[in-house]
Image (cartoon, grey):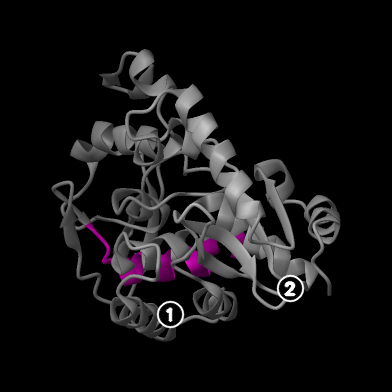
Amino acid sequence: MRLAPDVLIERTHLEARPPEARHLFHIAAVWHRAQADEVLSHRSAAVAWGLPIYGGVPDRPEVTVASGVRRGSSRTFIRHRSDRPLLPELVHERPVTGLARTVADVTTTRPFEEGVVVADAALRLVAGPSAAGGDVHAVARLRRDVLSEIDAMRTNRGVARARRVVEFADPGAQLPGESISRCTMLRLGCPLPRLQHRIESISGRTYYLDFYWPGQRIGAEFDGMAKYIDERFVRGRSPRDVLRAEKGREDEVRLELAGYGRWGFDVARRADMLGPLLRRIGLRW
């Protein structure tokens, strides 16, 4: 598979990898063509920071240059211009816009849902691995820094939308499907849930629900494929063991709730499907 005019890669190295990993290969393949003043930015910077992308990675790496530079986009790079200092950080040994600047760039240039996926993941990154909220001070600091970056932009394009994204973002969303589910709930006008709600089951085990509506004792979860194939969730278990554990977990969780449901990406992104499902499990609005 050709990544660049002078770079080929064995197809099997890419096919089984997620889009973000393939984009990192693409960046590595063409970075020797980047100029010294170019900084990886926008969705490409998000990928470098380890953030997920919803809606597709760019077909070429995105970079930012100073506003006075005349180089435009090419077959190799998508180039953005900025009249503010970029203050890059080294990530994977390449200059990349800082985390707050990256989130600001994505949320001002991409649709609301795409921005929420990146903003949720960025807040989760600084919050740390704890399911119970993590470092709240780091989360608040990053939120302030992103808003400051947005306010410093000398344009009105996308700024109002970006502020809404940052205010809506929540580090409790652990997967893009959870972020998209919340965006669809926002469109539906239903009550927004508490994320990663702690449940003590009858067996004494502790579980965390993706979504919980405390006033109605309704719980729900996004049932993405990651929990069956991603090593962070699988932890060396076989698919059968993962499925058995999920079934046992669900049986215990249901005992603590008045209503429970789960869905995948096909439902998460569609209000006409998620709305009826939420009503069917008992959510009222």
Q: Nearer the viewer, mark 2 or mark 1?
A: 2
Residue 151 is situated, as x and y percent measured from the top left of the image, at 43, 86
Q: How many marks?
A: 2
Kind of residue indicated by mark 1: Ile
Name the image quarter holding residue 9.
Answer: top left
Location of mark 1 (residue):
150
Query: Could you tell whether 121 is left or right of 182 in the image?
Result: left
Q: Is residue 110 visible?
A: no
Secondary structure, mark 1, is helix
The tag earlier along the polypeptide, 2 or 1, is 1
Identify residue type, mark 2.
Gln
Q: Nearer the viewer, residue 86 or 266?
A: 266
Percent position (x, y) of residue 237? 38, 28
Residue 108 part of the magenta-drawn span: yes
Quadrant containing the C terminus is: bottom right
Secondary structure of the residue carrying numbered label 2: loop
Horizontal side, residue 213 vs residue 277: left or right: left
Q: Report if the CB atoms under discs 2 and 1 are less than 8 Å apart.
A: no
Give x and y (percent) for residue 123.
38, 68
Q: Residues within 10 Å of mark 2 (few under 14, many from 20)?
A: few
Front-lying residue, 85 or 183? 183
Write the residue at 38% across / 53% down.
51
Residue at image x 33%, y 63%? 130
Cα gap from disc 2 to disc 1, whole angstroms: 37 Å
Which of the 4 image quarters holds residue 148? bottom left
Boundaries of the magenta span = 96-116
Residue at x 60%, y 46% (from the top left corner): 250
Residue position for label 2: 216
Q: Measured from the top left, where is residue 174 in percent x and y?
A: 46, 56
Side (left or right) of 41 relative to 216: left
Mark 1, residues whose alpha carbon is within 10 Å: few (<14), some, or many (≥20)? many
